[in-house]
Image (cartoon, rainbow, N blue to C red):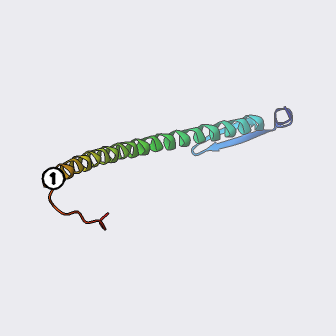
Amino acid sequence: MYVSRFNFTPVTVNLGFYTIPDIPLFYVIIGALLTGLVISYLVYLVRSISTSFAFRGKNKEIKKEKDEVLELTKRVHQLELENEKLKHESGDTPEDTNSL
């Protein structure tokens, strides 16, 4: 309210090659505010999209690593079963009591 009531002084605005004479200062202030908000929002959108693509890449990488862990876990389980099978087939081998 205060800004609009006391800032009706006419000013000339130069925008590059364009000159706009006798615009109330209130309109210049509001225009600058709105322009700043629009530019800030555009920067926010660009950053948001960039972050989204970065997260998408990281999520694919995490999924790939989880799949690798799953495959390795399956392989370890298969090897443990094979190891137990070999232990029971050759039951006459002496056991080392100090082994882990």
In this picture, residue 64 sits left or right of residue 12: left
Q: Which residue lies at the image location 75% right of the left edge and 41% below the top edge?
A: 11
Q: In terms of depth relative to the viewer, which is nearer, 6 or 82? A: 82
Q: In terms of depth relative to the viewer, which is nearer, 59 or 74? A: 74
Residue 48 horizontal/vertical position (percent): 50, 41
Asked which quadrant contains residue 31, the reply is top right
Q: Which residue lies at the image location 14% right of the left edge and 58% below the top edge?
A: 92
Residue 19 horizontal/vertical position (percent): 63, 40
In this picture, residue 95 sits left or right of residue 17: left
- Which image quadrant: the C terminus? bottom left
Residue 45 horizontal/vertical position (percent): 52, 38
Q: Is residue 41 visible?
A: yes
Q: Amino acid at mark 1?
A: Leu
Mark 1: few/some/many CA within 10 Å (<14, 14-19, 20+): few
Q: In terms of depth relative to the viewer, which is nearer, 25 or 52? A: 52
| Residue of label 1 | 86
Q: Is residue 22 visible?
A: no
